[in-house]
Amino acid sequence: MTVSFRTRIGVIAAFLLVFSAMGLYLHTREDAMTEKVMMYYGDWSPEENRFDATKWFRNDLYRRDVVEGKASAVTMLRNRPLPFKSSDNDEVVAAAIVALEAADPAVNGDLLGNTWPMLVPRIRYRYSAFAAPDKPQDYYNIYLKYQGERYVITFARDGQTGEIIPGGNVQLMYPDSETQIADREVFKELEAAGIQ
């Protein structure tokens, strides 16, 4: 079997094209890996509280968050968020009760404490940020239906140990709020999946 001259040229051109593309990819990746990633940490302050967080992105644990078309220097996204196990539920329920009662003294967490529902399936990863240099925290939302209302409770976990950090933020859901569209979609997904 003989191979025509055109076929040989085509095969050689294909190999050159593939190797050129691989070289360009590796070169671009290497450039991205040598670029320093300076991230803010802690609560907002007028000082430039930034540090070199490059190692957290190089090890593929986190990736840059893109906000309004630009890489954020405040938030990032964890590539593989730490999973919650059913054994974590007690701590999650306790965090939800504390956050609810701290946000609104009129909300009584006793009913939640008495029924102790399984909240782990109602948790969704949100974003990550640094509390201090090299101290990442991962933020999660609990989508909770409680006493006739819907709440989104945001809480943090230590990005290295997975320990739940006390405190949290509570947001009451409003049916027509433009800023809560994504959260309403999560509630619909949970209902469709039969997660109570």
Image (cartoon, grey):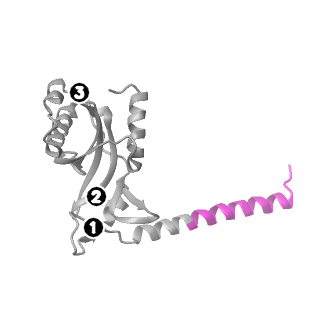
**Mark pair 1, 2: CA separation:** 8 Å
Find the distance from the CA under tag 3 to the CA under tag 2: 29 Å
Q: Nearer the viewer, residue 2 or 70?
A: 70
The answer to if 41 sits in the magenta stretch is no
Label 1: how many Cα within 10 Å (few below 14, some 14–19, many 20+): many
Viewed as shown, does residue 142 lie left or right of 107?
Answer: right
Predominant SS of the magenta segment: helix
Q: Which residue is mark 1?
A: 40
Quadrant (top left, top right, bottom left, bottom right) of the C terminus: top left
Badge 1 amino acid: Tyr
Q: For the residue labelled by badge 1, is the local secondary structure a helix, a strand or a loop?
A: strand
100 vs 3, nearest the viewer: 100
Q: Quadrant of residue 42?
A: bottom left
- Determine which quarter of the picture holds residue 128: bottom left
Residue where numbered disc 2 is placed = 129
Q: Secondary structure at mark 2?
A: strand
Magenta residues, as a range?
1-24
Residue name at image x 52 percent, y 69 percent: 27
> How far apart, in angstroms, are the residues tagged by discs 3 and 1?
37 Å
**Marks 3, 1: nearer the viewer:** 3
Question: What residue is disc 3 on?
Answer: 117
Residue 30 drawn at (x, y percent): 46, 68
Kind of residue indicated by mark 2: Ala
Q: Residues within 10 Å of mark 2 (few under 14, many from 20)?
A: many
